[in-house]
Image (cartoon, rainbow, N blue to C red):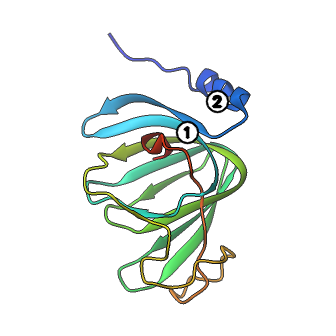
Amino acid sequence: MANIFDIAAIHDALAEKGQAGGESLTQFDDAFVGVGRYEGDSGWRRNPNGDELLYLIDGTVEIERLYDDGTSALETLESDQLVIVERNQWNRLECDGFATVLYISPSEDGAERQDGHPDGEDDDDFDGEGDDGEGDDNDSEGDDDDEREQN
């Protein structure tokens, strides 16, 4: 029997709570599928176990990703947009207000998380000026300890 999930109903239930939260839906191969409602800054994270898919159901999210050559990119993700975060890529998310994300995330085994910039740079602003890998990096979403629900 197929697993069918009513994402709109899950979204509405999370929104009714008026706070961050999430729901893990199922496992998909070696990854987890869920819906999370977030606010604020996720902190820096990366996962060595695979790529992560993030589909923004509602809200606006700034995502900053660091690249192997030392540069970074800051992008805005709007409702109904999807982003793939590559395996081992440092990234962080920030939302002003609440945002709801459907995620497919690899196992947390070996995942790294930290509050400060992975390169030791200043993380005090998330203004999009930091795409040269120097100093102007950003803060992002997350806070819920249903961390698996966050991504």
Looking at marks 2 and 1 on the same chain, the residue that comes earlier in the sequence is marked by: 2
Amino acid marked by disc 1: Gly
Mark 2: few, some, or many residues within 10 Å (few <14, many ≥20)?
Answer: many
Circle 2/circle 1 CB separation < 8 Å: yes
Q: Which disc, if any, is residue 14? A: 2
Q: What element carries label 2?
A: helix
Mark 1: few, some, or many residues within 10 Å (few <14, many ≥20)?
Answer: many
The total of numbered circles placed on residues is 2
Q: Which disc, if any, is residue 70? A: none
Q: Residue furthest top?
A: 1
Query: Label 1, on which residue?
Result: 36
Q: Is residue 90 above or below residue 98?
A: below
The quarter of the picture where the N terminus appears is top left
Instruction: Give the percent coordinates (x, y) of residue 14.
Output: 64, 30
Instruction: Give the percent coordinates (x, y) of residue 98.
Output: 70, 46
Distance, label 2 to label 1, CA atoms, is: 8 Å
Q: In this view, does 4 lie above or below 43?
A: above
Instruction: Give the percent coordinates (x, y) of residue 147.
Output: 46, 45
Q: What element carries label 1?
A: strand
**Which image quarter: residue 40?**
bottom right
Q: Is residue 37 above or below residue 39?
A: above
- For image coordinates 58% across by 37% down, the residue present is 21
